[in-house]
Image (cartoon, rainbow, N blue to C red):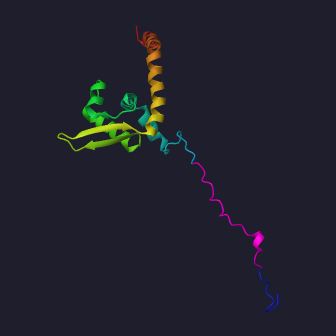
Amino acid sequence: MAMGLERVKKAPQLDQVSTRKPAAPRRRRREWNPYAAACPTRLVLDRIGDTWTVLVLGLFDNEPLRFNHLRRQIEGITQKMLSQTLKSLERDGLVTRTAYATVPVTVEYAITPLGRTLRVSVDSLRQWAETHMDTVLQAQSKYDKRASPR
């Protein structure tokens, strides 16, 4: 183009201008692959697969529970293991912990809405185990008889 003959861009006409803001780009849901070694879903699956987690979540209903109540209900769990399990569940957003300034300190744990969604699934596993335990024990006995040397 010759000097001084540059093209000038025309301003859009008023009827060509939108008053709406452009839509924010849609965020794609992150795809997780629990079969990949580095996938963080494995940490959640480890938590769900833990016996103590299943038993602790199974005791929660709509009201908060105290630490010692949980400990009395779950035979065989140590104070240390219950404490670790509750801290992990709290960290994952599945339970909340509330401490009251009493002597001694009163601590209550309550299930969160996220925890309730997991509790439903976990409770189904517990019910399955209760329903099929006789069949599993029979299968184990049959296997052990086959596998043991005579």
Q: Per the image, is 17 magenta?
A: yes
Residue at left offset 62%, top offset 54%: 26
Looking at the image, which is closer to me, 90 or 2?
Answer: 90
Looking at the image, which is closer to me, 130 or 50?
Answer: 130
Residue 101 location, quadrant: top left
Residue at the extreme top:
150
Residue 2 location, quadrant: bottom right
Query: Residue 47, percent across and down?
Result: 41, 36
Query: Residue 58, percent across and down?
Result: 40, 28
Residue 43 in the image: above or below residue 121: below
Q: Per the image, is 8 magenta?
A: no
Residue at left offset 77%, top offset 83%: 8
Query: Residue 57, percent across and down?
Result: 39, 31
State which region is magenta.
10-29
Residue at the extreme bottom:
3
Count of numbered badges drawn on the protein: 0
Residue at left offset 28%, top offset 34%: 67
Residue 88 in the image: above or below residue 150: below
Residue at left offset 75%, top offset 78%: 11
Looking at the image, which is closer to me, 137 or 52?
Answer: 52
Query: Residue 86, percent across and down?
Result: 33, 38
Quadrant into which the N terminus falls? bottom right
- Name the dominant secondary structure of the magenta segment: loop
